[in-house]
Structures are given as structure tokens and as C-alpha cells.
Image (cartoon, grey):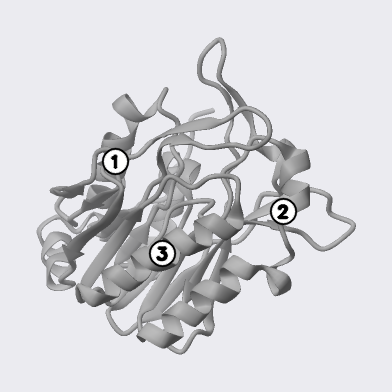
Amino acid sequence: MRAALLQLTSSDDPHTNLRVTSELVRSAASEGAGLILTPEVTNCVSNSRSHQQGVLHLEADDPTLAGLREDAARLGVWLLIGSLALKADPPEERFLNRSFLIAPDGSIAARYDKLHMFDVQVTATETYKESAGFKPGDTAVIAPTPFGVIGMSICYDVRFAYLYRKLAHAGAEILVVPAAFSPATGPMHWEPLLRARAIETGSYLLAPAQMGHHPASTGRSRTTHGHSMAVSPWGEVLIDAGQRFGVHLVDVDLANVAKARQKVPSLQHDRDFSGPS
């Protein structure tokens, strides 16, 4: 199975972002991709809660979701929308950071709300309080497909190894980590974390990412690390997109999952233990 990681530089304008993303989805399909993956917050990268309030929608009304579902159906491909920023149903005032797996008929095969919120001060001038603006999810999600079982996650989740072990124990063979990773932590942490999650579980790791300087019409603009990556079940980096915008292709062979898990069957060696006290 050929997968395509889309590396984007989304702005805070959902309409422009949909046009750009749709063009890349069509390009990826024309190159034989059966699974196409977009990054976190594909529809809107913004630090302004007031701007988000003005441009975001409920899931049922979201034009990006509708447009990408149409693309998947027209092209007959599986499409992992890394995440969309969406309004939540009242009385919840915070937004949702929600990932969607779209089947080739355009239906929604799975939804996943980001579990772990990025509440950190990474430098003296770079502070994030994601939980102030986004409601965290509470459910881990796997999704069977004809080419393997996908375990869903988003960005900051990658620091929590227990999530990926649970996904693998539940049957996941392909782990997805769509991201808008901070450039303050990315150079040291992004690749090691992705490789570790792949190695620990003997799974393919597919991580489409936002990159570069994101245009903002309102508020402070963001910069993201880029380096969309694909990692084999043995920990080999198959793709590192660097700062290259566009479509990045990788072939996924689930026989390599079986081989890695046979060589190092650590998923069979979990033990209950007590302590520390």
C-alpha cells in the first residue's frame, strides 16, 4: 500500500487551506496513494481564540470536512484528516481538536479527539495552554482498513508511550501522529519520539506535519517544525520531509510489522508489577 504524507503550511483562513489541501490530495492520488494523510489543524492554524470563533464550525457544518470527504469519494482513497479545529456543541465553549479517517466512499470511518493537551512553557517567550482553548478527548481509537489497523493520535500524544502500547495491543499496525510540532522542541525530540513509538510497538509510524511560518490575519502567527516522517516497524526512517511543502510518498508492507514483532516480541512480554511506593 502506498501512503502519502501531506506537509502543509496552513494559514488561519480555512477556505484557502481547503483549496490547497484538496489540490495536494488530488496530486497524491494521481501518484498511486491509497492512503493520504494531512497534518494537525489542517483547516486553521491560529493563536487567536476570537478569530477561531469567527471562522470555525460545528462538525456537521464544517466546509473542510465536507470538501475532503467529497475528495476521498471522488478519488476512491482513504483519507486521514490529521485534525480539524471545530466548535463543540454547547454548553462546551472550548473547541475540539478532532481527527477523521475517511473511507473511499466518503463516509467517516473513525473519529478521534486529541487526548493530551499541550500546556507547556517551552521557552521564555513561547508558552502554550491548549487546554484553555480545546477540550481534551477521553477515548483511544483504532480503525480497521483493508491495508491494516490504524491507531489514531495527534501531536503531543506522542510523548505518552502508554497510549501507543494500548493501541498496538488492541491490534494497531499503523500508528498515525499528525502534528503541528513546536520548533523549540522539534529538533531534539520529534524524530526520537516517533522512532521510539515505532520500535516499542513494531508498527509503522506515519506523521504528517505542519511546517514553516503560518500566515495569520489576526493575532500572533505560529511557526512549526515540519519534518513529516514515516518510520518502519524496525525504527528505520523512511521519510523525513524536512521543510519541503507538498506530497511525500512511502510504501507500507504489513509483512514488516509481523517480522519486527517476531524478532522482538515485546508486546507479548508485558508484566504486572507493584511499586514504587
Q: Which residue is mark 2?
A: 55
Q: Which residue is mark 3?
A: 151
Q: Secondary structure at mark 3?
A: strand
Q: Secondary structure at mark 2?
A: helix
Res 261 seen here: yes
x and y percent of residue 239 in the render?
Answer: 18, 50
Taking the spot 36% from the left edge, 86% from the top edge, the residue there is: 76
Specify the amino acid type for callout 3.
Gly
Residue 229, above or below 184: below
- Of the pair 116 and 165, the residue shown nearer to us: 116
Taking the spot 36% from the left edge, 30% from the top edge, the residue there is: 186
- Of the pair 173 and 117, the residue shown nearer to us: 117
Which residue is farthest right?
91
x and y percent of residue 83 in the render?
Answer: 53, 57
Residue 96, above or below 257: above
Residue 43 lies in quadrant? bottom right
Image mark for residue 227: 1
In front of the other: label 2 or label 3? 2
Specify the amino acid type for callout 1.
His
Res 169 seen here: no
x and y percent of residue 261 in the render?
Answer: 18, 62
Residue 221, above or below 232: above
The N terminus sits in image quarter: bottom left
**Label 3 vs 1, first from the N-terminus:** 3
The C terminus sits in image quarter: top right
Residue 2 lies in quadrant? bottom left
Q: Is residue 184 found left or right of 128 in the rendered image?
A: left
